[in-house]
Amino acid sequence: MFGKKRVAVIGAGMTLFRRNLKETGKELAWEASNMALDQAGLELKDIESVVMGTAPDAFDGVHMKGEYLADGAGAWRKPYSRVFVGGGTGVFAIDAGWWHIASGQFDTCMVVAEEKMSSCYPHPAYAFTTIFDPIYSRPLGVTLIWIFALEMHRYMHVHGIKKEDIARVSVKNKRNALDHPCAQLGANITIEDVLNSEVMCWPVQRLDISPTSDGGAALILASEDVAKKITDNPVWIDGVGWCIDTTFWTNRDLYYPKYVQGAAQMAYKMAGIKNPPKEIDVAEVYDPFDYKELHHMEGLMLARKGQAPKLTAEGVTQRDGDLPINPSGGLLGVGNPIAAAGLMKCCEIFWQLRGEAGKRQVKGDPRTGLAQAWGDLMQYGSVVVMRS
Amino acid sequence: MAIEKITDTRQMLHWPGHMETDYIYTLGIACEKFFIEIKENGRILGAKCKHCNYVFVPPKLYCEKCFAKLAEWVDLGIQGVVHTFTVAHIDINGTELKDPEIYALIKFNGAEGGLVHKLGEVRPSQVRIGMKVEAVFKPQPNRKGNINDIKYFKPRE
Amino acid sequence: MSEKIKHFPGESLKGRDIREGRVPTIKHRPNVKYLWSAGVAMSRFLEGLKKGKIVGSSCKKCQRIMVPPRAFCEECFRPVDGYTNVKDTGTINTYSVSYVAGDASRIKEPILVAVIDLDGASKGMGILHLLGEIDDWKTIKFGMKVKAVWKLPEERTGTITDIKYFKPME
Ligand SMILES: [Zn+2]
Ligand SMILES: [Zn+2]
């Protein structure tokens, strides 16, 4: 349709996700992208274009870090661009890689994401306060968690959702992460552990939140012609979508993520998906907080409004359930190096659809997968739909 | 809606602020080895790519051209050549410096890239592109494993 | 991680390795200051606060009264038709109880924070502000009516904190 070229994913790589890694951001980018090349059976000279995804400069503490990371992303003397839509960056990066090839301009594109949040003191949260409007919000002493707490509370209020319904997500994802060799916070915890953890900003508690992390991830994309020469097992990018809602975040009804719905509708239309919960076999949904997995499932129309907690309680979203969500362990379990976390989700869908996810492999033979991320000042959605 | 031509924000309604964050950067795998060598042995190392026959200074963990991991280290000595230089008459805040400072890009024999550093024991009028210089290190006990372990480069007799 | 991959790069450090100097690091504090111009619409809003008024802007096309005010309607993409005062009362749309400060350090006395939908503005036009004069935060309710508590006129400087907080209306 539209005369676009079909685009395949043919290789993926990632580093460990940890609170502090010794490697510089460049070195993390290189480790991940070198592994992805290796997995695709390609060399750097085979790569025609590079897309870098990395979140606020204020984390790494290097202004214009797109340029700073370029050599580690394999961009030396190549067409290169950095994309940035906050937390949505990781999934938006693969969307951007897609248009490089779909346009017919390139046959190969390496998509790389990196974040090194450990450089920022006293805490990366402090750098986050500078994303708020300096005049309306910052004089009130705003902290990042406020907006999540306000959104979570509104979501709970509108649908009458209890904290334990939400805590199940944290329990599931941290347990899933025990099977992920790169995971920072895999653990066996209980709903009570979550409910008894430190209250940060009610209703957000310590174990509702993903950690801050260092890490890198990378994917190799190729046109159909090139992909078919290299691999018998390509994974196709069949849908991409992205969308932003009002920048006046206090003017939105926070209970429902319309920006995710907009991004999903765009991707589903392109992929010809009419009934998302039936047609999607496995999804990596953006989960920096446990409630966000539920909130985003509803925005993605994988669950009806207010129904995601019920599906979770029934075990539908477990790895052996009918609609596995975040089999990787998600941001809550694997870790949250912002842009790299989003691209990690794309890597996971790639591995799941190739049947290479090992202990994390979901049941059946998944043919259609989705990854989604959320970003900017919590009103940006990015989505990718892949098929094997 | 007219666009007002005000160039000084202080004349308008405004809000002051700053982004107060500290950064602590790890040096990474390649750079850490580079600075430990400077600190402990007063040696400047490059990293060589066998495939590209190219020596990087400062060293990298990987070759940016062919993406190979770099594991071969080359001792570049402490002598280099002024590739280009500038004379700074003002500091970072725009304040005039009593003694102008000379900053140069110094290249090393057999290596690509180079180090940006200060020149010392020389007057600005005496500096020439192509001039041979050598590193002057701080005394070993005072070295901390960063670029200032080299005090400056001075002309070679 | 694909089961085909056997080695996972990354050398993990403990926080104390860095704090106690067991690995070499470089420290830096960027020293930049900012002056943010309030611009066309926000200047009116801040001037209004000084007078004890909350200023919104109106768009005739979509019939919205917007707070905070903007110079243009982002839905209709045209200049707003004017500025109008809304009330300093409203309802709690959502709220949180914050035990965390901006630098992620912990605080004993929680900050009560809310999105407040202001009366006289279009539905859902909330602003972010603090709640006060509440002894037990468990008494806060969604939909509760609140009213702005202003600083004294001579103390106001044209900032969002000219409103000290919003308090419950009896
Ligand atoms: Zn090379
Ligand atoms: Zn309008």
Image (cartoon, grey):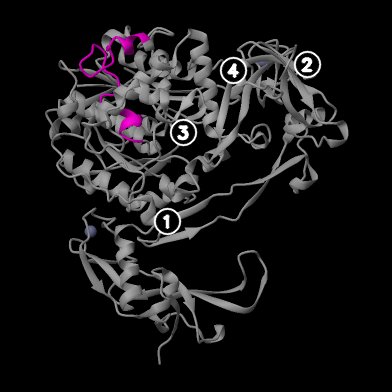
Foreground tag (2 vs 3) = 2
> Under 8 Å from ligand 2: the CB of mark 2?
no
Could you tell me which quadrant the C terminus of chain B lies in? Answer: bottom left
Task: Indicate whether A306 appears above or below A237.
Answer: above
Answer yes or no: are tags 1 and 2 on the same subunit: yes
Please name the residue that numbered disc 1 is placed on. C19
Tell me the kind of residue under disc 2: Lys
Give how far across and how far down residue C162 sits, in percent: 77, 31
How far is disc 3 from disc 4 in space, using C-alphas? Answer: 37 Å
| Mark carried by residue C87 | 2
Do badges 2 and 4 share one subunit?
A: yes
Q: Please tell me the numbered disc located at residue A85.
A: 3
Query: Alpha-carbon distance for marks 2 and 3?
Result: 35 Å
Q: Residue at x 36, y 13 (%)?
A: A269
Which is closer to the viewer, label 1 or label 2?
1
The answer to which quarter of the image holds residue B81 is: bottom left
Q: Which residues are the magenta region?
A: A310-335
Tell me the chain of label 4: C
